[in-house]
Amino acid sequence: MKTYSEEFLRQIDVHELLPQQEPFVMIGTLTTINEVTTISETTIADDNIFVDDGRFSASGLIENVAQTCAARIGFVNKYIQGNGITIGVIGAVRKLVINSLPAVGQAITTTVDIVSEVFGMTLARATVTCEGKELLTTEIKISVRSDAA
């Protein structure tokens, strides 16, 4: 996979890469994508459906990780293969550790490193950070349908 500049990636509307649409979009922008790593940044909005008592919930963090994976898949489909969006399903979330939940207005950075991709299954390790602190670590498996949406 070629290297894409952060400037180019930030200009992409993530809605073009995801099967989800508002109010269920949990990522803001892509900043890095290469053969192994995908990084997204998101500022937690007060009207986000996963905000409770001024904090982004654990479910929101997990969905943010899943959508960072989905944005990577959408990017590959659209910009590299010239295909449409595909639907993915979370197959497993393992080794989940949540240290803290971010507050409304805070920016989170989600890093997903692909461990393996085989037969439509992707295994990835993910970390979510905020202001230099590790909020979440996990492994996630995503199964991708072979037909475009």
Image (cartoon, grey):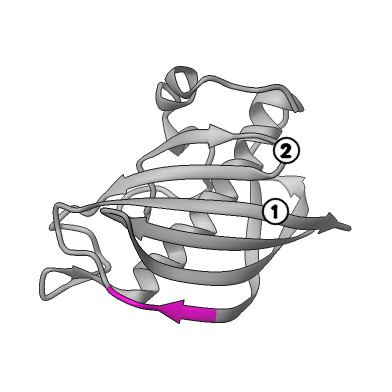
Alpha-carbon span between mark 2 and mark 1: 8 Å
Q: Dots 2 and 1: beta carbons under 8 Å?
A: yes
Which element carries disc 1, helix, strand or loop?
A: strand
Nearest the eye: 147 or 96: 96
From what the image shows, is residue 114 above or below residue 38? below
Q: Badge 1: how crowded within 10 Å, few (<14), some, or many (20+)? A: many
Mark 2 sits on what residue?
35
Image coords of residue 147 (percent x, y): 77, 47
From what the image shows, is residue 148 above or below residue 56? above
Q: Badge 2: how crowded within 10 Å, few (<14), some, or many (20+)? A: few
Residue depicted at x 64% and y 65%: 89
Q: How many marks?
A: 2
Quarter holding the N terminus?
top right
Indicate whether residue 99 is drawn in magenta.
yes
Mark 1 sits on what residue?
114
- Amino acid carrying label 1: it is Ile
Residue depicted at x 57% and y 43%: 38
Magenta residues span 96-100
User: Is 123 displayed left or right of 21 in the figure?
Assistant: right
Residue depicted at x 70% and y 53%: 114
Image coords of residue 53 (percent x, y): 11, 75
Image coords of residue 50 (percent x, y): 27, 68
Nearest the eye: 81 or 129: 129
Which element carries disc 2, helix, strand or loop?
A: loop
Q: Is residue 4 visible?
A: yes
Image coords of residue 133 (percent x, y): 32, 62
Residue depicted at x 50% and y 43%: 39
User: Is 133 displayed left or right of 3 in the figure?
Assistant: left
- Amino acid carrying label 2: it is Glu
